[in-house]
Image: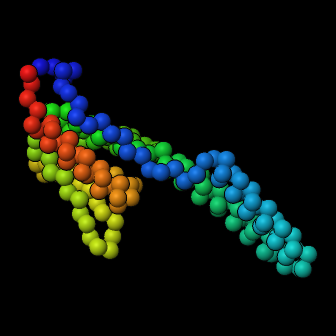
Amino acid sequence: MSERDDPVFLDAVLRPNPPMSPGVLLAVLVGVAAMNLGFGILFVLRGAWPIAPFMGADVALLAWAFHASRMAARAFERVTLTSTTLSVAHHPAKGRTRETVLNPYWVRVQLEQPEDMPRKLTLRSHGQSVQVGSFLGPRERRSFADVLKAALGAARAWRPA
């Protein structure tokens, strides 16, 4: 049996939620810049001109934060499960893709659930471990863990015809 004949039990792409659309971010930035400009002019007219550069720095830092959050939202993970492999490919916003391949028959799905911290979803097999969905919320992570466990059960039970 070739790899092409190997059925795919799960092919999921996990992405972080984007902050907002670029148009909304620009509108927020323009609104903050207009307010800061108004306050800056008010301070300059009252003789407190040293405050004006800080008002501009606020806007510049906010623009940088919006840009950084949009770039971070480009990262994603692809989880592919066949009867012979479980592949987890981490695609960061910048840098190289990192792929981990595990044997699905031996994979354990661990969802750590400490009370005071977000949950952590880890796949373990033969001394290897890979964290999945670190950018997902606790409910989404729990839901994906359930879907992955069901798909692993189906992959383990599958027999070629």
Say if 132 sits above or below 2 in the image. below
Q: Give the camera-side residue of 106 and 92.
A: 106
Residue 136 figure quarter: bottom left
The residue furthest right is 45
Q: Residue, x 71% and y 53% (percent of image)? A: 27
Is residue 128 visible to the viewer in this orientation of the structure?
no
Say if 160 sits above or below 119 in the image. above
Q: Give the camera-side residue of 65 and 155.
A: 155
Q: Position of residue 84 (x, y in %)?
A: 14, 33
Q: Residue, x 75% and y 60% (percent of image)? A: 31
Q: Is residue 157 left or right of residue 57?
A: left
Is residue 42 visible to the viewer in this orientation of the structure?
yes
Q: Position of residue 87 (x, y in %)?
A: 24, 38
Q: Position of residue 9 (x, y in %)?
A: 22, 34
Q: Is residue 125 left or right of residue 27?
A: left
Is the image coloured rainbow, by chain, by secondary structure, or in one colour? rainbow
Q: Which quadrant of the rendered structure holds the N terminus? A: top left
Q: Position of residue 101 (x, y in %)?
A: 21, 39
Q: Residue, x 30% and y 63% (percent of image)? A: 119
Q: Which quadrant of the rendered structure holds the C terminus? A: top left
Q: How many marks?
A: 0
